[in-house]
Image: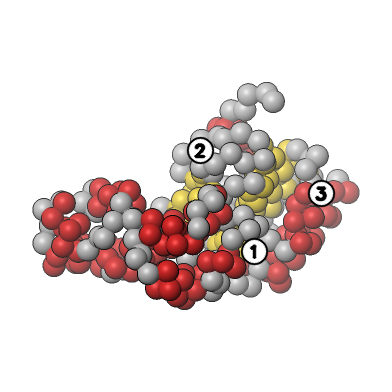
Amino acid sequence: MKDINPQLILEDVDAIPESAYIWHWKTEHHFSLHKHNKGQLTYVEGGAAFLYTKDKTYFLPARHYMWVPAGVEHYFQHRYPANYVRTIYFFSEPDDSEHPFYTKTGIYPVSNLLLEMILHTAAWDGDILPDDKRFVFIKAIKYMLPAISSVPLPITLPTTDNPRLQPVLKYIQENLGEPLTLETVGHEFNYSERTLTRLFRSTMDISFFQYLKLARMIKAMEYLLETEKTISEIAWDTGYNSVSAFSNTFFKLVGKRPSDFQP
């Protein structure tokens, strides 16, 4: 496979506003925070991934796709070897803003029909123009998305560029299996429990404990899809000493039991 300049790809996506742009790649490419004038559908074949915006982290599990509206700053990262990352950038239309789906970032399940349609574009590359017969097919994908994507994956993790809170979040992410509390985390950074509580609330409008719960569930989903760990091992590795408590929390947040989430 030839070397690809990520910056040129980003420029090519928006070069022809009325086109759809197709890109399938098999290796990791690193993009900084960026945005497009086109809505973006990305499906990862064979691996989990993460979508980062300025204020949230989205987990993209297997058999799901991400939708990024036009104009939303983001970057994408898959942490494990993947067969292909398949992306379709859709032309924008004046009435896109009138439909809630096209204006909200989200992670959605991939139906069998949508998967077959995405895979049908595997041999296509670059711009698909309105006078191309394939354009009708791409337009059909775009128009069907709202009807088949009514329920997004409910878990997203807020983030921040606040310099006081960033190292705290990093520490939490690196120690999810430990018995983290306001007291222990605050002690690590010389914050009182009250100060740390207010820092979470004022910066990200979320409590420390809610953030910790969401972070642990996203890590659990990652383990369920990418490792051979048992559910009891995953519970332990995400800070739970009770499988039932872990399973109940997972169900409340994800809508499925851990055993039903595994591939």
Would residue 37 appear left or right of 250 to someone viewing this image?
A: right
**At label 1, which amino acid type do we have?**
Pro
Q: Residues within 10 Å of mark 1 (few under 14, many from 20)?
A: many
Image quadrant occupied by the N terminus:
top right
Nearer to the camera, 208 or 251: 251
Q: What element carries label 2?
A: loop
**Mark identifier at residue 31:** 2
> In this rendering, which labeled residue sits more in front, label 1 or label 3?
1
Nearer to the camera, 9 or 84: 84
Would residue 235 appear left or right of 97 to someone viewing this image?
A: left
Q: Mark 3 points at which residue?
A: 120
* Alpha carbons under labels 1 and 2: distance apart: 25 Å
**Mark identifier at residue 26:** none
Q: Name the residue under label 1.
A: 109
Q: Where is residue 95 in the image (x, y as percent from the top left)?
A: 66, 66
**At label 2, which amino acid type do we have?**
Phe
**At label 3, which amino acid type do we have?**
His
Image marks 1 and 3: residues in contact by CB distance under 8 Å: no
* Alpha carbons under labels 1 and 3: distance apart: 18 Å
